[in-house]
């Protein structure tokens, strides 16, 4: 079917809010994940490279995760806007049915479904494995003997080093600070005006010669010793050889849809529990198949927002999507932990949610402004109004004496 002018107009109106929600939500998720990795990244001299690799490998995961919510919000915004400006009334009065009105949104949902299958089914498993590979490299990188200015480096489990300035080679340092904690609980703090760093011949440690500094040592008994020195030498260990990385496929998140189906339905006993594999397969498929059904739910929500209010309609839609995602996560947990059949914990609830979307839209075709969604949102709006009225401060009534004086 060739898109008409109306189709292009509706899609153009929906793409802008959808893209805004996807980008903002994805950036928030990325920042939250990276904030948890900053402490680990700061202990290696190649933190910037690892940071960029982590960002690239996390993007497919969060795009697929935020796609249903961004799609639904984009549809709700455009339908609510058209309803408030009475454009929907003009469109329906011109002979366009509600099903034809929702057709471009369903078509966009089909395209996003294929994108979600590509992301969840094939790109994300490899990007998740690459993400774990980067974390493995960061955890085993440690300190390789290079010093960057004002970077807090971990030269061992209880040794921390930093310098305000360093030459391009990282061997000539200025304003050096070292903190060492000994096995008996002794803490040594060393500060020096300058330092010379040289790697030893065994490539297992480096020798740091400190110039014009002071050492403050505190014992376990809280005894403090201060020593001024002109030159002193400190041996610092380098990172040990890294452990080998496990092959891809050790976790269900690292398997593609084809691999999940082969291992989940195959005759040979898989390495991972069969119900865990099937739960992952069904949950990924359900998240992708849900996208063409979301317009059938978003259009009635947008139509009911004019009567019940956009806030209550958006809250109701968010709760429904949250319940769907919670059911997927809970179903995966029940299939993995309790070994319940994934067909009952994930596939059937997902099919029921999609069927509810279809029924809601079919009921809305007869009376667009009166449907189960409008009934639900109106009751939720009444609850919100009651809560707001209860929280609103009450004005004190004037007393009879005051009224008499007036």
Image (cartoon, helix red, strand yellow):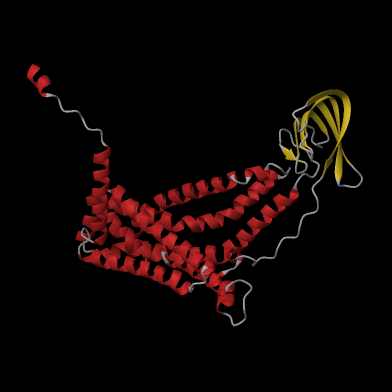
**Residue, far bottom:** 267
* Furthest residue toward top: 405
| Above or below 173: residue 252 | below
Determine whether, in the image, residue 262 is placed left or right of residue 362.
right
Query: Measuring 49% from the left and 72% from the top, which residue is drawn there?
Result: 340
Residue at the location (39% across, 59% down)?
Answer: 323
Residue 252 placement, left or right of 143: left
The residue at the far left in this view is: 404
State left or right for residue 314 relative to residue 340. Answer: left
User: Where the C terminus falls, by quadrant?
Assistant: top left
219 and 379: which one is in front?
219
Please report the residue visible at 50 percent of the width from the left and 46 percent of the height from the top: 28
Number of numbered callouts drawn: 0
Q: Residue furthest right?
A: 201
Task: Please indicate, yes or no, whether residue 353 appears anywhere in the rendered image.
Answer: yes
Residue 172, image quadrant? top right
Q: Position of residue 178 (x, y in %)?
A: 77, 33
Q: Quadrant of residue 261?
A: bottom right
Q: Is residue 16 left or right of residue 60?
A: left
């Amino acid at each position: 079917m060739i898109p008409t002018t109306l189709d292009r107009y509706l899609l153009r109106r929906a793409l802008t809010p959808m893209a805004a929600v996807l980008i903002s939500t994805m950036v928030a998720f990325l920042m939250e994940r990276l904030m948890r990795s900053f402490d680990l990244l700061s202990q290696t001299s190649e933190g910037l490279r690892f940071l960029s690799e982590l960002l690239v490998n996390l993007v497919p995961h969060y795009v697929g995760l935020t796609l249903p919510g961004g799609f639904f919000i984009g549809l709700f915004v455009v339908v609510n806007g058209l309803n408030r400006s009475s454009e929907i009334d003009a469109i329906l009065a011109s002979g366009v049915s509600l099903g034809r009105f929702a057709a471009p949104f369903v078509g966009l949902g089909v395209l996003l479904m294929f994108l979600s299958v590509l992301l969840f089914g094939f790109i994300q498993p490899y990007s998740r494995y690459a993400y774990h590979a980067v974390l493995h490299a960061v955890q085993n990188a440690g300190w390789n003997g290079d010093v960057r200015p004002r970077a807090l480096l971990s030269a061992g489990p209880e040794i921390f080093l930093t310098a305000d300035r360093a030459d391009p080679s990282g061997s000539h340092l200025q304003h050096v600070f070292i903190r060492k904690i000994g096995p008996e609980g002794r803490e040594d703090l060393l500060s020096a005006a300058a330092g010379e760093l040289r790697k030893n011949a065994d490539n297992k440690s480096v020798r740091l010669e400190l110039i014009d500094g002071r050492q403050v040592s505190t014992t376990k008994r809280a005894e403090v010793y201060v020593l001024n020195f002109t030159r002193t030498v400190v041996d610092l260990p380098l990172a040990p050889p890294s452990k080998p990385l496990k092959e891809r496929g050790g976790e269900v998140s690292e398997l593609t849809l084809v691999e999940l189906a082969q291992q989940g339905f195959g005759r040979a006993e898989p390495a991972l529990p069969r119900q865990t594999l099937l739960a992952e397969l069904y949950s990924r498929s359900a998240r992708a198949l849900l996208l063409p059904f979301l317009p059938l739910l978003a259009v009635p929500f947008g139509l009911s927002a004019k009567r019940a209010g956009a806030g209550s309609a958006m809250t109701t839609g968010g709760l429904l999507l949250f319940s769907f995602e919670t059911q997927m996560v809970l179903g995966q947990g029940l299939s993995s932990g309790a070994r319940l059949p994934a067909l009952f914990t994930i596939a059937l609830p997902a099919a029921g949610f999609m069927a509810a979307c279809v029924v809601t839209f079919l009921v809305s075709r007869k009376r667009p402004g009166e449907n189960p969604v409008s009934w639900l949102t109106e009751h939720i709006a009444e609850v919100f109004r009651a809560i707001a009225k209860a929280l609103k401060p009450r004005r004190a009534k004037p007393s009879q004496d005051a009224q008499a004086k007036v």
